[in-house]
Amino acid sequence: MFGLGKKDTTVFVVVIILALCAPFILNPFPTGSSLAQFNAGYPDLMQRFVIFGIFAIGFNLLFGLTGYLSFGHAAFLGMGSYAAVWMFKLLSMNVIPAILLSMIVAGLFAVVIGYVSLRRSGIYFSILTLAFAQMSYNLAYSVLTPITNGETGLQITLDDPRILGSSATADGGIPVTNLFGLEMRNFTTLDIAGWSFNFSVGYYLCAAIMIIAFYVAIRIFRSPFGMMLRAIKSNQQRLYYTGLNARPYTLAVFVISGMYAGLAGGLMASMDPLAGPERMQWTASGEVVLMTILGGAGTLIGPVLGAGFIKYFENIFSKINDSVLHGWFAFLPDGLENFIVTLVHPFVGKGWHLTLGLLFMLVVIFLPGGLVEGGQRIARALRRDKPEDNGAARKASQEPAE
């Protein structure tokens, strides 16, 4: 099915189900319950899950297949966002041209950076990509302010020409991004027995694009091109001894990975038409590295899981403050309640990074293959005894009675 093997088809179908059913899966608790704090089925948050999933999928093509660790992929994310906003300002508010331009601009930018950076490998490659990203950040922040609007960020205004669309709505407001008339911010709420589910146009556009991006990544993984990339990761020097030049392959996957990042940046601008230099900072590049390693570098679904895991902690656990904690432990005596809140306080709210760091350490120590390896271990543990028991019973039934 889909031109994929059995296992790849299973993984692909799982991703499709998770993406389409996310409004139900991410809202497990009733709206009025105390545990509703952990629901994540909000349109903006779900969009971030899939957008950063696309970003991590593209990064995994480079890092997971070739072993080249880039610390500058946020530059392509920012370039994609700027290109998309400029398309909204000059052409129309339709998201399709903006997304296509963001991929093209990020790809061209990746050709330039990759051509220089891939002349080195290992830590030198990582430092070069980091340097390019920081240069891009500083250019966007202070030097290219006529194009990027500097620290304030680039955004759409009533003065934009928009040659294929209106510069203002009928009531004099700024137009919103749309897909052939369907506004990205539109959503429908379904209330069922205390649960509330939100279905957003913007989310399902991002989810559909992520599904396509995931399918393309699978085909790259299983292609002869992907086999060559694995050979580069395994032993690039031996590859050169066979007479094969690895540089065209590494540059090609670097550009593809950059286009994935540009696509993610274009989608971010399509959901919220604003582009700022902070998207090019080294912290954004480090975040996608954490997503890939936490989920499982070199695996198919790992980067998607890692992106969802980190964004969940960022958006849900960061909202838990002292008042929420006191509400949870209000049934305890006052002294004990205050003591527990004091213990938990450093791990939530502004301290959510501490919890994420501890979890990341545990995963790296006990699950070197990431969350995917954890899932594989659980699956093996569940079916470990079944084949042995069935085989023993079959052997006993075949033995002659004494």
Image (cartoon, rainbow, N blue to C red):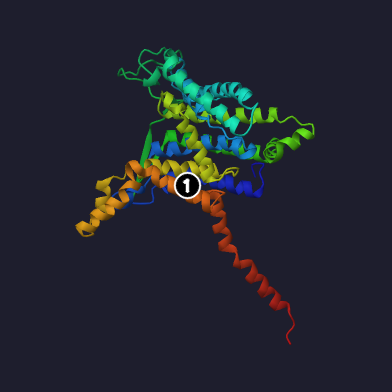
Mark 1 Cα shell of 10 Å, populated few (<14), some (14-19), many (≥20): some
Which percent across, then down, holds residue 197? 37, 44
User: Is residue 99 visible in this depiction of the protein?
Assistant: no
Regarding mark 1 in the picture, which secondary structure is present there? helix
Give the residue displayed 64% in from the left and 69% down from the top: 388
Residue 216 spot, x, y in % from top left = 61, 36
Location of the C terminus (image quadrant): bottom right
Residue in the picture at 39% in, 36% down: 44
Relative side of 282 to 346, left or right: right
Q: Residue furthest front?
A: 124
- Residue at the far right in the pictured view: 242
Where does residue 234 sit, x and y in percent of width and height? 69, 41
Q: Is residue 66 above or below residue 18?
A: above
Query: Between residues 391 and 362, which one lies in front from this camera angle?
Result: 362
Residue 143 x/y as whole percent: 44, 15
Q: Is residue 148 left or right of residue 196?
A: right
Q: Is residue 231 left or right of residue 200?
A: right
Image quarter (top left, top right, bottom left or bottom right) of the N terminus: top right
Asked whether residue 296 appears in the rendered view, the answer is yes
Q: Which residue is mark 1?
A: 360
Q: Which amino acid is tagged 1?
A: Phe
Total labels drawn? 1
Closest to the observer, 284 or 385: 284
